[in-house]
Image (cartoon, rainbow, N blue to C red):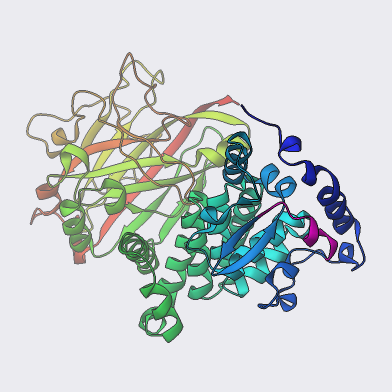
Amino acid sequence: MQLPVAQLSLVGLTAAGLALLRVRRGGNEGRDKIDCLDLSSWNAEKPHSFYLSGDSLFVADCGATVEAVRLPLHTTVLAKQCQALRQVLEQHINGGTDGVADLSRAFKGCALLPVACTLRLLYRPQEVNSRSFGVLAKAGLLEGVADVALRLQARRLLRSVKAFLQGMATRLAAERSSVPELAAALAVAQKCSFSHASSGCMEAMAEKLASGGAGGWQDGRQEASLAALDSATLARLVRSVSEQATRRLYRSPPVFDVRPGGPGQAGGFTWAVPGFSRHSRRSSSSKDDSASCLLSPWTEVAGFQWRVRLHPGGSGSARGSHLSVFVQLDHTRALSAGHRSVAATFSLTVFDQGEGGRDFVAVFECEGARPSSAAAARTVDRGGSQPTAGDAGEDGSQPSAGDPAEHSGSEGAPAPSTPGRRADGTSPSTTRALQRSPHGPRQGVFSRETDTWGRHKLIELPELRRSDRSYLKNDRLLLRLDLRVCGTHPA
């Protein structure tokens, strides 16, 4: 038999309910003027006075013993807000047990002050706000209060704690607060299984530690905070710090010779990548394509933002054998400008930096641009004008047998999608081998689903290192993107 809250106790319906109502409306102590939990009113000798007012003490109809101290309680307050206590009280009444219900088991192992603070927030809901949680956090009591609320299944109170922690994680990150503050917030978020708040605190801690250098780890307070973390959390933190440090060390090589182009006109930019051999070794040995790729800065061409994704040691099945290069559209900005998709023809040129060298050029036509829409790759003698997406490959020539560019062909079927990362960290990109597919996305059409086109096997790595070519002069790669927008589709 399930009894409604109002029937749990006849006493609770009358005197206790009226007394508590007077407390919330002001009573004799003017509590209506207090909207923030005040720890200065805590009296260890009379802990019940911290959450109860005078006359409500005499109509208590249940109780609990915490750290050998008896706390008077009321069914009308606790049964309505705490699912765990409601079940205990229902069992007490339905079982016909005489006497006052004892709720001590629900508080077993809890410290007295966090229990008193939790009870105060349950008895005085007007104090459930960010100011009170801030007071508790500063006093190091928020984790204990959250633990008690979890035990009691006080869902409304837990929702308020969650909202506070989420805002706290954002605020602490913005204010670059100390690691101990972030660690305290992380502990509460983990105890309550608030994944979003936990992630925010973890990222903020990693950013703080990565930016502080070795000195930050040697700080006494920070060391104590880190020592209190469990092994799984500490492992996640170390990994996050490593990622943050790597991002800080890497700076995208600059672009130059930028030609913005215009509607229907070709534009492009050249990207210099120094230290190619080091990047190639790291990329070849990495199993994570997104972590081993280099990204050029976003650059405006033909009214849209583009960048080049370069895998110096290859990606996917081409890892360790080829140079992999992809062109990515900033689809978020394109969509905000009213374009759902953008069709483009482009070429990628690897410059031979020697005198009178032969540049490697790969041309990618957007599907439907002309009957011969297969991608072409070839070497071009230096001496004429620099090839662009508008003029390279206009003769329709394909790489001949034996020509080094023959190895830049696609892998026969669209390659598996390779997760990438946007500059703002929002949604992952999709990379595909550029090849016509009757079931896949249209070739050369950049959209939300396929914002990246290029080749896993653009050019063989041994070809880049040929002694009679200067593709890697002084260990620097010069890569040029030339692009022309063929059309757009409105959002």
134 up-or-down from 17: above or below: below
Task: Answer whether residue 468 is visible to the viewer in this image.
Answer: yes
x, y (%) of residue 36? 77, 66
Percent position (x, y) of residue 395?
Answer: 29, 26
Does residue 1 appear to the left or right of 357 in the view shown?
right
- The quadrant of the picture occupied by the C terminus is top right
User: In which quadrant will I find the N terminus?
Assistant: top right
Compare residues 135 and 327 and report the one nearer the observer.
Answer: 135
Left or right of 32, for residue 165: left
Q: How many marks?
A: 0
Pick whichever, 383 or 168, lies toward us: 168
- Residue 285 at x, y percent in the picture: 15, 54
- Asked whether 444 falls inside the magenta stretch, the response is no
- The image quadrant that residue 400 belongs to is top left
Residue 174 can be seen in this image: no
Q: Residue at x 75, y 76 (%)?
A: 41
Which of the two residues, 215 or 330, is positioned nearer the viewer here?
215
Q: Report the magenta residues as a range.
A: 54-62
Considering every residue shown, the one lying at the far front of the view is: 98
Q: Is residue 216 above or below residue 286?
A: below
Q: Is residue 342 left or right of residue 78?
A: left
268 versus 112 height, above or below: above
